[in-house]
Amino acid sequence: MNNPIISIRNLCVNYITSGKPIEAVNDVSFDIQHGEIFGLVGESGSGKSTVVQAILRILPTPAVISGGKVIINNKDILSISNTEVLQYRWKQISIVMQSALNALNPVLTVREQIEDVLKEHNDLKGKSAADRTIELLSLVDIDVNRLDSYPHQLSGGMRQRVVIAIALALMPPLIIMDEPTTALDVIVEREILAKIIELRKELGFTILFITHDLNLLLEFADRLAIMKTGRLLELDRAQKIRRGGKHEYTQKLIRSLPSAAGTREKGLLPKPESLDLGEQPLLEVRNLSKSFSDSGIFYSSSSEVVKNVSFQVFPGEIIGLVGESGSGKSTIAKLITRLIRPNSGDIFLNGSNKKVSEARKVPLEYRKQVQMVFQDPFSSLNSIHTVYHHLARPLLRHRLVPEQKLSDYIIEMLETVGLRPGTTFAEKFPHEMSGGERQRVAIARALSLSPDLIIADEPTSMLDVSIRMEILEIFARMRIEKNLAIVFITHDLASARYLADRIIVLQHGSIVEQGVAEDLIQSPKKAYTKQLIKAASPGWLKSLSIINTKKARANHV
Amino acid sequence: MHSNNDSIFTRWVTGILRNRKAITGVAIIFLFIFLAVFGPFIVQDPTAFLSTPLSPPSWEHLLGTNGQGQDVLAQTISGARQTLLVGFTTGIVVVLIGALIGGISGYYGGRIDDFLSLLINLFLVMPGLPLMVILASWLPPGPATLIGVLVLTGWAWNARVIRSQMMTFRNHDFVSAAIVSGERNIRIIVVEIMPRMLSLLASSFIGASIYAIGAQVGLEFLGLGDVSTITWGTNLYWASNDMALLTGSWWIFVPTGLSIAIVSFALTLINFGIDEVTNPRLIAERVWRKKISQETISNGITPVIKKNE
């Protein structure tokens, strides 16, 4: 094991500013051995992508590499000439980028993009280039008649396969994968990962895999390194890290991973002892449908995003609305909060006979009772106003609190969601706070009107793993304290399981299955739900690789 | 209880004050405004016949006299008053109308947008210059006519740009959040969205002002303004009538022409400054290029600069 394919020694990267340079990567060292999958995990801003870009020397402009060595084949990449740099790119190291749609050129066909790489580096021409292109596509399981398709004609998973094919084109010994599956749905993600493992067995390349998703790497990587604020905190074999790791930060990360398999661990998120929901539903959604139409002079098209969805939410209940992108879950959130109007169907609040969905103008009373927490706290707060403004406006509008008590009430609300001291946070602007703090402000804003129902649309998906549980904990606590009903929308079955009482699984705009959370996880009835649960459980990789080895054996015989 | 120490406005003002381009532009504009306001009280009467026509610059008349024997310096300074007044007023009115129509159109969407977009497009496809000439010659000459004509032919483009930006902001979550909390639409537009569009509104104002000054001078040069008033445009009109170019009396038209050029230049500088203040990336890139040696910069390859070497 002492034959590293690449060794990085004391790498430092600075961003040049008019003042002091900002240290993005500080003294990072690690070796990657031949044939292994090396994982680099970190939250946003940890410097993991910067390390990778420094290896390829493709950092964006204000950056310079300010120290260290990157040694491949006994050569330090940081001290060779610029023409040599161009030669080792792609031949020695290639990269698979995060968003396949951005990595592919929209005006070139798949064939043109692959052949371009071959011609540029290998001087393959005409027939041999065409043959190689077909060979590469079959490696990643893409049908040959897709060769002349444009990127937009392919699905997200297929595009990512094409990008992988391009990375494989020159058979480099090391392939860097920078969050290659983050933009994909869980099930597609798992397929791509299985394919990568299969290809590695076949072709024997080494992988440097970068992601924020520790859960994924624990299954996938041989060894992994954990980064935070530009430094390497821990580097060990995946099995050892799974058992808890040495560094405090690693332990915190491992603890905050909910799982969809096995029995539910106690104490992770509080649930009330007994759940007496009563007879009368708080919110009733009946046969809700919504389609978006796009019409012009020469064309018209319409797509049905939500199809005939019905469900009930009782006071004090948390419903988990689970689905992948395109399942219509965010559209349902917008329909319930009346940001958009349904094509058909009814929404009843508080058992009233008034169909909220019919009123043209939403009554102010409804606005008070139904609040929403958005996915992205960077966009749901207005950057030009203080936290105080964000909380004061709704309260003034609904005349809930007399003006002289306003600031006391706001400070109290901020402290309830864990922003202490409230007086300091009230004066802050959104850009002065971290993502987690902003999301707490957004939750405080939703809670300040004492609503009966909160719609939380993926409230943790934009946040770093280590603080997700803390945010979910606020929801769990508020429900118990204030008898609040919550519709928790997520793509992550595991976190829905821990927070919600009941789970509704959505696919393509319709409800696949609904039931009490634990029952649904332990004994799912529909195939789609089973697939989702399998993808979110530890050991998913093994179950996928078994299928693949079986296939490989069958081919052999 | 809450201070606005770090609000976008203060950041903006300090940013502009620290930006070399912007502060130069602002200084020039203020100088011209100062001259336009107080200058006429200091200089000689611009309408009085003081000396021999077409006499070149001398100590008595620093910039010489024109075909009527009037002092060119006095005319240039007095001319600034109405020209700048019409220019900046048009700029403000154009931005106000653009923000109103474009803002409403982009925010509400649907039928309202269909109708207002049609209106905007209608004004966009109308040939501006002929319309301007016809209207200016048909209406009674004067500053009000000029402003009216310039606004009518100039508002649509700004409305269009503001509409697009409004449509982008309309889909931001902070707007949805405000709607869900029960905020009134008009308040959302004015308090939540408009301040976010400050840089666009400011550069729209500057663009519209440059256009208004240019177009105004052009119309007056053609004799479509009120030729009895003194503006930069009529100065050039009289210079042309007196055949200043043929007689080689450059001092008649150069001061006015140069003033117009400098004002436009200063406004453009402010626009560049606003760009840099609101898009710090532009500055970051320049600093980066300045701080590292030129040899190490190569297209697309990150430079290596080690401290100990």
Image (cartoon, helix red, strand yellow):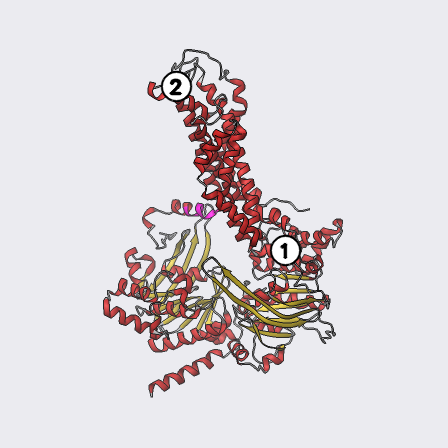
Query: x, y (%) of residue A551?
Result: 39, 84
Chain to which mark 2 belongs: B
User: Is there any visible trace of residue A450 in the rendered image?
Assistant: yes
Q: CA separation, marks 2 and 1?
A: 64 Å
Within-10-Å neighbours for mark 2: few <14, some 14–19, many 20+:
some
**B56 and A69: which one is in front?**
B56
Q: Secondary structure at mark 2?
A: loop
Within-10-Å neighbours for mark 1: few <14, some 14–19, many 20+:
some
Q: Where does label 2 land, which residue?
A: B242
Question: Which amino acid type corresponds to the residue marked 1 in the rendered image?
Answer: Ile
- Residue A15, above or below A460: above
Quarter residue A364 falls in = bottom right
Q: Look at the image and tell me in which quarter the N terminus of chain A lies.
A: bottom left
Question: Which amino acid type corresponds to the residue marked 2 in the rendered image?
Answer: Asp
Q: Secondary structure at mark 1?
A: helix
Chain to which mark 1 belongs: B
**B32 and B53: which one is in front?**
B53
* Magenta stretch: includes residue B282: yes
Left or right: where does residue A39 sit relative to residue A144? right
Q: Which residues are magenta?
A: B279-285
Query: x, y (%) of residue A103?
Result: 39, 62
Q: Look at the image and tell me in which quarter the C terminus of chain A lies.
A: bottom left
